[in-house]
Amino acid sequence: MARIYGINIPDEKRAEIALTYIHGVGKTFSKKILEKSGIGPDTRVKDFTETDLAKIQNAINDLEIPVEGELRKIIRQNIRRLQEIRSYRGLRHRLGLPVRGQSTKRNARTRKGKKKTVGGMKRKLAKK
């Protein structure tokens, strides 16, 4: 398996798709990277040479795309900044609730976690 920025890229995939396994590289950036490095998008990763991998890493550096650890660090800093200035979005991040205005009455289980039942105790009616 080829390794770029510490990520194992699958051998059987086309280069255009395989580069999207790197955090921060989508299809558009993948095409730009391959165009800049001079590698065909239909080339399989197993056919890459060491020089091809070096060309890809140089192309990513030349395009100044933040990827992997650097991108994760930037995102983490942005979220921390929102929390420090006590913005609404920062509060939602801190509480683990959806940030972008989604409804939480019935949905948002992925973000909120396992259901926690609150209240709902039956009242015992006093016999008269």
Image (cartoon, helix red, strand yellow):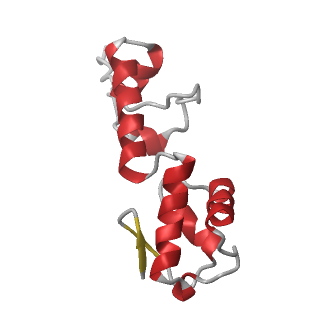
As drawn, 53 above or below 121: below
Q: Is residue 42 above or below residue 92?
A: below
Point out residue 8 in the picture as x, y percentages from the top left corner. Answer: 41, 73
Image quadrant occupied by the N terminus? bottom left
Does residue 89 appear left or right of residue 59 in this picture? left
Could you tell me which residue is drawn at 56 percent across and 62 percent down? 20
Is 26 or 41 nearer to us in this picture?
A: 41
In the foreground, 80 or 125: 80
Q: Residue at x 34, y 37 (%)?
A: 116
Percent position of residue 46, x then y: 53, 87
Q: How many marks?
A: 0
Q: Residue at x 29, y 17 (%)?
A: 126
Comparing 109 with 54, the one in front is 54
Judge left or right: residue 107 versus residue 118.
right
Q: Quadrant of residue 40?
A: bottom right
Quarter of the image holding residue 37? bottom right
Q: Quadrant of the C terminus?
A: top left
In this orientation, does residue 24 appear? no
Q: Which of the 4 image quadrants contains residue 41?
A: bottom right
Give how far across and how far down residue 51 sits, in percent.
49, 77
Residue 62, position in %: x, y? 54, 51
Q: With respect to residue 17, does 105 lie above or below? A: above
Please state if 79 lies on the left or on the right of 61 as rendered.
left
Relative to the observer, which residue lies in front, 43 or 78?
A: 43
Q: Can the viewer see residue 73 in this picture?
A: yes
Above or below residue 42? Residue 93 is above
Q: Is residue 80 left or right of residue 13?
A: left
Instruction: Residue at 56%, 55% (x, y): give it.
Output: 25
